[in-house]
Image (cartoon, rainbow, N blue to C red):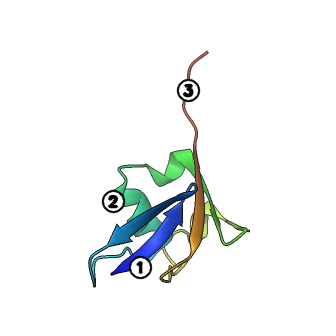
Amino acid sequence: MESLKINGVKKQFPAGQMPSTVAELLKQLNIRGATAAAEVDGKIIEREKFSETKLRNGQSIELVRFVGGG
């Protein structure tokens, strides 16, 4: 079983089902990439690189989602 720590919470994935990129992780979480910021192991990932940023077992991910309103 593989896992990622997402916003401080460990999330486990069955073998072979862990998202391979930041973009895939956002899709699994139903978060639009255009409304999110991501940090992987302390490194801020540019939105344009979400689809090419590979994820590995045990990494720590911080996600911030922007919403409109007042």
Q: Earlier in the sequence, mark 3 or mark 2?
A: 2
The quarter of the rendered structure image containing the N terminus is bottom left
Q: 34 or 70, which lies in front?
A: 70
> The disc labelled 1 sits on which kind of residue?
Ser
Question: For mark 3, does the 10 Å Cα neighbourhood hold few (<14), some (14 to 19), or many (20 or more) residues?
Answer: few
Q: Position of residue 28 (x, y in %)?
A: 33, 59
Question: For mark 2, does the 10 Å Cα neighbourhood hold few (<14), some (14 to 19), or many (20 or more) residues?
Answer: few
The quarter of the rendered structure image containing the C terminus is top right
Front disc: 3 or 2: 2
Up the image or down, 38 lies above or below 42; here it is above
Q: Position of residue 68 (x, y in %)?
A: 55, 26
Q: Which residue is mark 3?
A: 68
Q: Earlier in the sequence, mark 1 or mark 3?
A: 1
Up the image or down, 16 lies above or below 61; here it is below
Q: Which residue is mark 2?
A: 28
> The disc labelled 2 sits on which kind of residue?
Gln
Report how far apart the C-alphas of labels 3 and 2 lie in the structure: 22 Å
Dot 3 falls on a residue whose secondary structure is: loop
Horizontal side of residue 10 vs 16, given as left or right: right
Up the image or down, 27 lies above or below 53; here it is above
Residues marked 2 and 1 touching at CB (< 8 Å): no
Q: Position of residue 33 (x, y in %)?
A: 49, 54
> The disc labelled 3 sits on which kind of residue?
Gly
**Which residue is located at x 56 percent, y 19 percent?**
69
Q: Which residue is mark 1?
A: 20
Dot 1 falls on a residue whose secondary structure is: loop
